[in-house]
Image (tube, helix red, strand yellow):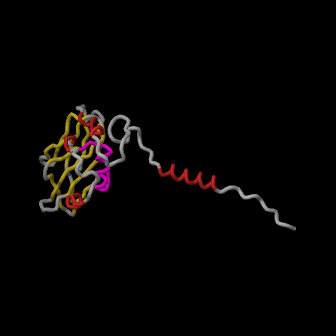
Amino acid sequence: MAAQMTPRKPVLPLVAALALGGLLAACETVPMDGGFGPGPRSGPAPGVFRADDFAWSTRSGSASIDGRIDYRRGGEIYTCTGSVGLTPDTPYTRARIRTLYGSTDRAAVPEAIVRARTVAEPSADYRAYVRSETCENGRFSFTGLPDGGWFIIAPVSAGGDDRVVLMRHVDTRSGRISVTL
């Protein structure tokens, strides 16, 4: 009795379907605003500086941030050692923050490590969009902010030369928010 042979089905369509499925699975779902402030965004890859991405952050608004430093490590209490910066969340700053701090949510990284890391487009001048306030007695505040995402950056020290830079992402939405770093 002869074995009955079944015709082989082409494998190429199956391979193509699996490859397409893998590509789609690798895509990240991002909100319409890209998480970078109000309004739809499109544009260059992260890490590319575009002044237009910062435009929303230059407007005034009714949001404010009341901040307090309460950072402790190894039994030591850290205090502010300078001004606190407020950087708008844009594709450029998000990529920069991720490189420098290893997170876009929150971090506490020794200043020496932050300074040793290399970012894309290091000469891009986004400083005109960064707000700065003095930190006095462990407190700082920003007022007149538009709605959007922001990175709070605060250098702290326990008295020695080993400063730590605290970073925290916040979203303002037409109100007062309180933040403890």
* In the depicted structure, whether residue 112 falls above or below residue 167: below
Q: Is residue 142 magenta?
A: no
Q: Is residue 101 magenta?
A: yes
The part of the image, by quadrant, that contains residue 131 is top left
In the image, residue 11 sits, relative to residue 179, either above or below, namely: below
**Res 2 quadrant in image:** bottom right
Q: Nearer the viewer, residue 24 or 163?
A: 24
| Residue 25 picture location, percent across and down | 50, 51
As drawn, is 3 to the left or to the right of 11?
right
Picture mark count: 0
x then y, percent, for residue 99: 30, 55
Q: Position of residue 103 (x, y in %)?
A: 32, 53
Between 110 and 57, the one lying in front of the other is 57
Please indicate whether residue 23 sits to the left or right of residue 175 in the image.
Answer: right
Query: At 25% from the left edge and 56% from the top edge, which residue is drawn?
Result: 108
Residue furthest out toward the right: 1
Residue at (87%, 68%) from the top-left corner?
A: 1
**Residue appearing at x 72%, y 58% in the figure:** 8
Numbered range of the magenta stretch = 87-105
* Residue depicted at 20% across the width and 61% down the height: 112
Q: Is residue 17 above or below residue 43?
A: below
Between 115 and 104, which is closer to the camera in this rendering?
115
Pick the front one: 145 or 77: 145
Residue 83: x and y, percent? 15, 47
Q: Residue furthest bottom?
A: 1
